[in-house]
Image (cartoon, grey):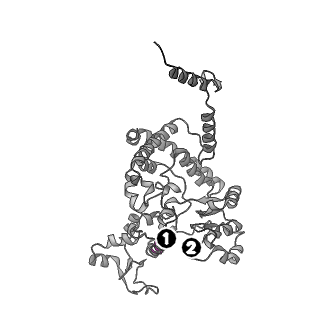
């Protein structure tokens, strides 16, 4: 059998190309791939959740979760228009709820919720059930609510000053429950631009306000509103400085796409006022020095991906919550949608570590979380979800 000269030269070059690589045992080490792996490993060490070490069944549970996520990603690469995290949450919510990934996350214990507006924590379905309780009055036209044993006084800020028992209006309007539900949620058909969405968003709270009351449990202070349109923290400097030594501040700050303007500068004031937390902090990434200070002072950043998308700060959740019921969401599962089990566990643990619970309460919370976490892992591996994801 005779080989031609080109074949011999090609084989010789192939052998020579490997002769220059160092040997480790019987393996040939490619310097290019070694450097590439080094960079990947260095970056992975900076990723959120890297310090979490999964053990035993946790590893299997993570494999189950990641198989389901990988299946979604593989489909998305072929059909990018179907990828749910890239779609507007108001439109994609029902499809998200049907996914294997979400159904796994729904089972998972999530620690504490740091950022939610008090009037928007309950799901819309639960709020709607409250409208069937006795002694609830509703404005004759509109959707203001008030619990009262006697007819309430006129509404000063409402176009109609006449109240009627809600059961009376429900008899006259068979579709009232659907209308109430519509007025308690942002609609995907009304989400044109950031100012339009905020206008609709702010209209929701008066409707919910008459249905919800909370005990006097206050651990800190915040100022809430659309930063692009309202006063800055600097405007309230004198009042805030007067109480900062005796008050925990949890300021909304940096919930904006603007750079170098008043809403963006709220981040400076929040830090100078020694805030313990920053709500959203969406603009923080544009300020390297402030990010450095936030890390040094261990200031908690309450990241709210879905809220940021719905309120038009980001269009695609891959590039990046706080009012669950207003989006139609029911808990934190939606916001935990795009992370592996290490990152998810770290998020949950952080919610206890950086909470305002005292030392004894934190120890108790960590103990409860550890137990419920292992129950979640055990039950997940027994469930059809892991079989389906395999």
- Mark 2 lies on residue: 228
- Whether residue 125 is visible here, answered yes or no, is yes
The reply to whether dot 2 and dot 1 touch (C-beta < 8 Å) is yes
Residues packed near mark 1 inside 10 Å, few (<14), some (14 to 19) or many (20 plus): some
Residue 351 placement, left or right of 192: right
**In the rendered image of this protein, does residue 170 appear above or below residue 75?**
below
- The quarter of the picture where the N terminus appears is top left
- The quarter of the picture where the C terminus appears is top left
Q: Secondary structure at mark 2?
A: loop
Quadrant in the picture for residue 254? bottom right
Quadrant in the picture for residue 220? bottom right
Percent across and percent down for residue 77 are 43, 47
- Mark 1 lies on residue: 194
Residue 15 placement, left or right of 297: left
- Residue 198 magenta-highlighted: yes
Residues packed near mark 2 inside 10 Å, few (<14), some (14 to 19) or many (20 plus): some
Per the picture, the main secondary structure of the magenta-coloured stretch is helix
Q: CA distance from mark 2 to mark 1?
A: 10 Å
Q: Secondary structure at mark 1?
A: helix
Residue 223 placement, left or right of 189: right
Percent across and percent down for residue 36 are 61, 38
Residue at the (47%, 62%) spot, across then down: 324
Task: Give the magenta range.
Answer: 196-200
Percent across and percent down for residue 41 are 61, 40
The mark found on residue 352 in the picture is none
């Amino acid at each position: 059998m005779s080989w031609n000269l080109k074949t011999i030269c090609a084989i010789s070059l192939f052998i020579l190309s490997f002769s220059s690589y160092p040997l480790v045992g019987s393996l040939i080490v490619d310097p290019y791939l070694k450097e590439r792996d080094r960079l990947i490993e260095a970056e992975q060490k900076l990723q959120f959740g890297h310090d979490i070490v999964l053990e035993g069944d946790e590893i299997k549970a993570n494999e189950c979760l990641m198989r389901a996520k990988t299946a979604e990603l593989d489909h998305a690469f072929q059909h990018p228009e179907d990828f749910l995290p890239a779609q507007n949450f108001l439109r994609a919510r029902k499809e998200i709820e049907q996914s294997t990934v979400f159904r796994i996350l729904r089972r998972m214990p999530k620690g504490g919720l740091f950022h939610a507006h008090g009037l928007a924590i309950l799901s819309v379905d639960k709020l709607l059930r409250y409208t069937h309780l006795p002694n609830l009055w509703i404005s004759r036209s509109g959707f203001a609510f008030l619990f009262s044993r006697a007819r309430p006084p006129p509404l000063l800020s409402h176009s109609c000053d006449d109240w009627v028992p809600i059961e009376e209006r429900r008899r006259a309007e068979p579709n009232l429950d659907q209308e109430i539900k519509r007025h308690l949620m942002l609609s995907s058909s009304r989400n044109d631009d950031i100012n339009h969405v905020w206008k609709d968003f702010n209209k929701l709270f008066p409707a919910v306000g008459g249905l919800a009351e909370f005990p006097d449990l206050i651990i800190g202070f915040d100022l809430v509103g659309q930063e692009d349109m309202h006063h800055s923290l600097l405007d309230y400097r004198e009042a805030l400085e007067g109480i900062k030594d005796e008050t925990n501040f949890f300021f909304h700050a940096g919930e904006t796409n603007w750079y170098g303007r008043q809403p963006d500068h709220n981040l400076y004031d929040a830090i100078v006022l020694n805030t313990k937390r920053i709500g959203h902090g969406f603009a923080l990434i544009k300020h390297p020095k402030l990010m450095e200070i936030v890390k040094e002072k261990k200031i908690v950043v309450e990241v709210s991906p879905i809220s940021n998308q719905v309120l038009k700060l980001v269009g695609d959740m891959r590039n990046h919550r706080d009012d669950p019921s207003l989006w139609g969401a029911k808990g934190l599962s939606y916001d935990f949608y795009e992370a592996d089990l290490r990152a998810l566990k770290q998020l949950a643990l952080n919610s206890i570590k950086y909470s305002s619970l005292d030392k004894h309460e934190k120890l108790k919370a960590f103990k409860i979380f550890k137990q419920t976490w292992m129950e979640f892992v055990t039950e997940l591996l027994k469930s059809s979800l892991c079989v389906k994801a395999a």
